[in-house]
Image (tube, rainbow, N blue to C red):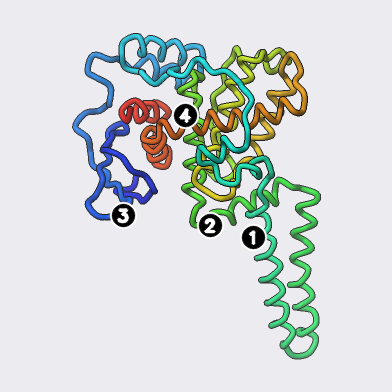
Amino acid sequence: MASSMYLPVVGTPFSVGNYKYIRSFGSSSKWTLIKAAASSSAPPNVDLSSLDSAISQKDSYAVKEALDQLREAGWAKKWGSQPNISRRTTSLRELTTLGIKNAENLAIPSVRNDAAFLTTVVGTTGALATLAGQLPGDWGFFVPYLIGSISFVVLAVGSTNPGLLQAAIGGFSTFFPDYQDRIARHEAAHFLVAYLLGLPILGYSLDIGKENVNLTDKRLEKLIYSGQLDAKELDRLAVVAMAGLAAEGLKYEKVVGQSVDLFNLQIFINRSKPTITKDQQQNLTRWAVLLAASLLKTNTTLHEALMVAMSNKATVLECIEAIEKAA
């Protein structure tokens, strides 16, 4: 774990596991990492071993039960603290008023990374091919031809195996200065909103091409597979699914990581009963973004603390501790 890091976060000192973050003096957003005296942010009389064991065993029932017990003991105060949510008609103006940038374009998949990658490939190979044309003799013909064909190979790979092209685009995306912040902000939003709504988290990843938050709930999983999600459960899953999109929309003019989120939301909609119309689906998406963004704005300090924890590869338990410590 690094000794210091730079993230656009604000707030009071907080601990993550055995480490404590304090704000350095000055105008920068620097957090300095120091060793904390305590091994856990939980009070001495609170035992987190059951929760730790449940997470390790990937047992969603046990994780939920352990967190429910910790809440009753007065520790996990943020766990399931937003149990009552109710869908309503939502307008684009409400999203804009809340602070979502370009609300009308939230559901349009971004091609920023794809376009930047392909433009770079075509531009670079074109420039190199032009330079190679100055080579003497036959080299001046064959080398530019070979270099110029790289662009066609990339497009061919993208057509026959999109996964390989997306992996390349994902790697290229790391060169954007906002990449790490977007990933951490996006995934921390899924994690935090799920936690606030009482959905157990079993794992997460910020790795390139593997960004995800694993919040599998066995009961919900059965409902999804059987196509029997009711309106209440659909609403909860919709808010969690749109949390990453909402987090990006509150900070950036363009949302980059919404494609998978929208795809997951559509799966939930398709697996719900009763079936909802296209207009109802559109309203559900807007409402879910609005509620997720509201939760994130209300719990900004928690979201930022979780971003730092996840960026430093904290365990799920340490992430939960970061949330509760920052509350």
User: Circle 1 is placed at which residue position?
Assistant: 116
Q: Is residue 206 visible?
A: no
- Residue pictured at 38% horizontal, 40% vertical: 308
Q: Which residue is mark 2?
A: 176
Q: Secondary structure at mark 1?
A: helix
Query: Hey, what amino acid is under mark 3?
Result: Ser
Q: Which mark is residue 44?
A: none
Query: Going by the image, does 112 lie left or right of 75?
Result: right
Q: Which residue is labeled 4 in the image?
A: 295
Q: Earlier in the sequence, mark 1 or mark 3?
A: 3
- Give the residue drawn at x 70%, y 71%: 125
Instruction: Identify the mark nearer the N-term, 2 or 3.
Output: 3
Q: Looking at the picture, does residue 148 appear above or below residue 131?
A: above
Residue at coordinates 57% horizontally, 27% vertically from top-left? 239
Work out whether mark 4 precedes mark 2 in sequence or the reverse, and give the earlier one: 2
Mark 2 to mark 3 CA distance (whole Å)? 20 Å
Q: Are marks 1 and 2 in contact (CB under 8 Å)?
A: yes
Q: Position of residue 105 (x, y in %)?
A: 65, 45
Q: Earlier in the sequence, mark 4 or mark 1?
A: 1
Instruction: Please tell me which residue lies in front, 94 or 118.
Output: 94
Label 4, residues with CA under 10 Å away: few <14, some 14-19, many ≥20: many
The image quadrant where one finds the C terminus is: top left
